[in-house]
Amino acid sequence: MKTKIKVDKVNVVTLGCSKNTVDSEVMMGQLKAGGIDVVHESKNEDFNVVVINTCGFIDKAKEESINTILQFAEAKSKGYIEKLYVTGCLSQRYKENLEKEIPEVDAYFGTLELPALLNKFNVDYKHELIGERVLTTENHYAYLKISEGCNRKCTFCAIPLMRGLHVSKPIDELIIEAKNLARQGVKELILIAQELTFYGLDIYKKRRLNDLLHQLCKVEGIEWIRLHYAYPTQFPIEILDAINSEQKICKYLDIPLQHANDNVLKRMKRNITNKETKELIKTIREKVPGVNIRTTMLVGFPGETEEDFEDLKSFIEEMRFDRLGVFTYSHEENTGAFKFEDDVPQEIKEQRAAELMEIQSAISFELNQEKLGHTFKVLIDRKEGGFFIGRTEFDSPEVDNEVMIPAEDKYLRIGDFAFVSITNATEFDLEGKVNS
């Protein structure tokens, strides 16, 4: 017989990427369906149980996760909370070590152990709750995780160790989830996966992202569909036709390239060359005129020389990406690159990252200046100070440009669209006025 603990309110704390955000939302939906009062990252102190959904991707993320666990472990030791549970990527990867080092935690769970976690609250996992999530984002946009895990063998990446191999969610389940989200007021779906373009190969024996996109476009209430994390190797060109033909699909593509030097790409096991990457970017831009491309680069990979880095800088200057993020290499045990010597000093890694962002800042400023005087459809995210803050179809929440609109000019509702004429532009933000 299950022992039911007294639970007044559960506070879920989410760390890491958008995939963790979805996991927390699903967990909260299951808890709520089981009659548990649940909140997300509450600023009040009216909860007595905490669940931390951790990230274990790179050193900084792991440090943040451990510090958060220690913070709530101390709160538990002082009697401020009664129970503390930890789940997510860090717990999946380092469960045994964490149990020894931080025994104040009542139980640790891996990324696929939600039923076991729910069991601690005397709640059974309900399979029928497809898409029944408690949104932690603004109600007008949500992440839609179309698959879990990854089959790629990138030597720098520990994700397969924490998330397992690629598993696609069936199209019919995703459509049900999208409809449920639309009923909650969601207007923008952000499709996420560790490897978006691999979608469908495991369950349909062929890539089905293109089919999924066309089906999602039929969901009433959804107005924007955004694509994140598309792997460049064997990129399914047919999805470019979908982006071009379907008005609901944003002309935006997040395609993490990681590097541009052939030697580094080979050691990373990215299975693509500098020349092939340039050809892919050219094809994307030709087939989808006006598309905005976001990418991510990794600097300081073992063996990355100054010459390799110069190749990367030249590539960025030539390609002129609309959005770009930079990470410094983190030496992760049990990854393919762990056998290499982590021979690029941290200060050099940081210096190279800063150099790339300086190049990108200049590119972003020039591209944003070209927007002056033009009108864009903007989704209003929030009001902050004397401004309404929104995004164009070329911008994803939290990582890309924002459009600032003086609140005194016109009242706007959060979650509504407005047509905004751009009056000022900096490196990473725009200002504008609503068209009358």
Image: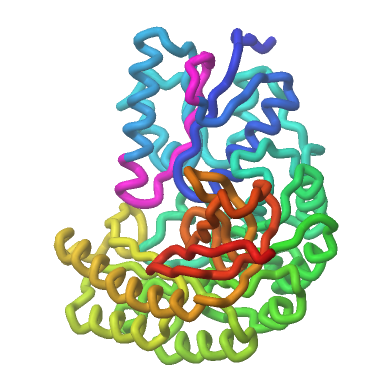
Left or right, 102 with reference to 342: right
Left or right, 107 with reference to 78: right
Does the magenta segment cover residue 26? Answer: no
Over which residues does the magenta segment extend?
Answer: 43-63
Across and down, in percent, residue 47 comes to: 53, 16
Across and down, in percent, residue 377 comes to: 66, 67
The answer to which image quadrant residue 315 occupies is bottom left
Does the magenta segment cover residue 60? Answer: yes
In the depicted structure, whether residue 260 falls above or below residue 17: below
- Point out the image quarter for the C terminus: bottom right
Q: How many marks?
A: 0
Which residue appears at 78% of the width and 38% of the height? 129
Which residue appears at 48% of the width and 81% of the height? 370
Query: What's the colour scheme?
Result: rainbow
- The answer to whether any part of residue 154 appears in the image is yes
Which residue appears at 76% of the width and 42% of the height? 184
- The answer to whether any part of residue 300 appears in the image is no
Q: Nearer the viewer, residue 418 or 46?
A: 418
Which residue appears at 38% of the width and 74% of the height? 365
Left or right, 276 with reference to 63: right
In the depicted structure, whether residue 344 falls above or below residue 289: above
- Point out the image quarter for the N terminus: top right
